[in-house]
């Protein structure tokens, strides 16, 4: 989920990560999922954030995970790349 937002100056994007208690019962599971999400975003956010700042397009992003028995960092990383690319395409800025 994302939306255009009025953000403080020099902030192209605000990002939040959610691993619901309903789907991940222990804090250890929730924290690991959120660590994986943050790392996947960090690795692939450079060009994405550059496009946003160049075109003055501030966004607020919220990444929410749903329960999956076979969730892994590799799966999260691949999905993160797809999500960031799809947002870029919707905004009309391809890499």
Image (cartoon, helix red, strand yellow):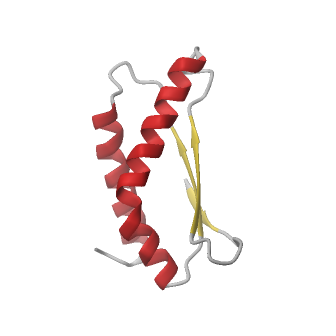
Q: Nearer the viewer, residue 53 or 71?
A: 53
* 84 up-or-down from 50: above or below: above
Q: Residue at x 47, y 24 (%)?
A: 67
Viewport quadrant of the C terminus: bottom left
- How many numbered discs, if any? 0
Against 34, is 15 above or below? below
What residue lies at 51% left-to-right and 20% top-to-bottom?
29
Q: With 16 as the anchor, is 72 left or right in this view?
A: left
Q: Quadrant of residue 30?
A: top right
Left or right: 7, with 46 as reference point: right
| Residue at the top extreme of this rendering | 26
Residue at 32% in and 53% down: 81
Q: Quadrant of residue 84?
A: bottom left
Task: Give the image location of residue 70, x and y in percent.
Answer: 32, 22
Q: Looking at the picture, how far across and down is residue 74, in whole percent?
A: 28, 36
Tell me where residue 27 appears, x and y as whole percent: 60, 19
> Viewer-proximal residue, 40 or 75?
40
């Amino acid at each position: 989920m994302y939306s255009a937002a009025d953000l403080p100056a020099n902030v192209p994007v605000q990002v939040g990560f959610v691993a619901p208690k309903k789907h991940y019962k222990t804090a250890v599971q929730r924290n690991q999922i959120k660590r994986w999400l943050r790392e996947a975003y960090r690795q692939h956010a450079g060009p994405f954030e550059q496009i946003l700042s160049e075109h003055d397009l501030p966004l607020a992003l919220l990444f929410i995970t749903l329960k999956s028995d076979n969730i892994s960092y590799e799966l999260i990383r691949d999905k993160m790349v797809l999500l960031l690319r799809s947002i870029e395409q919707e905004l009309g800025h391809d890499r």
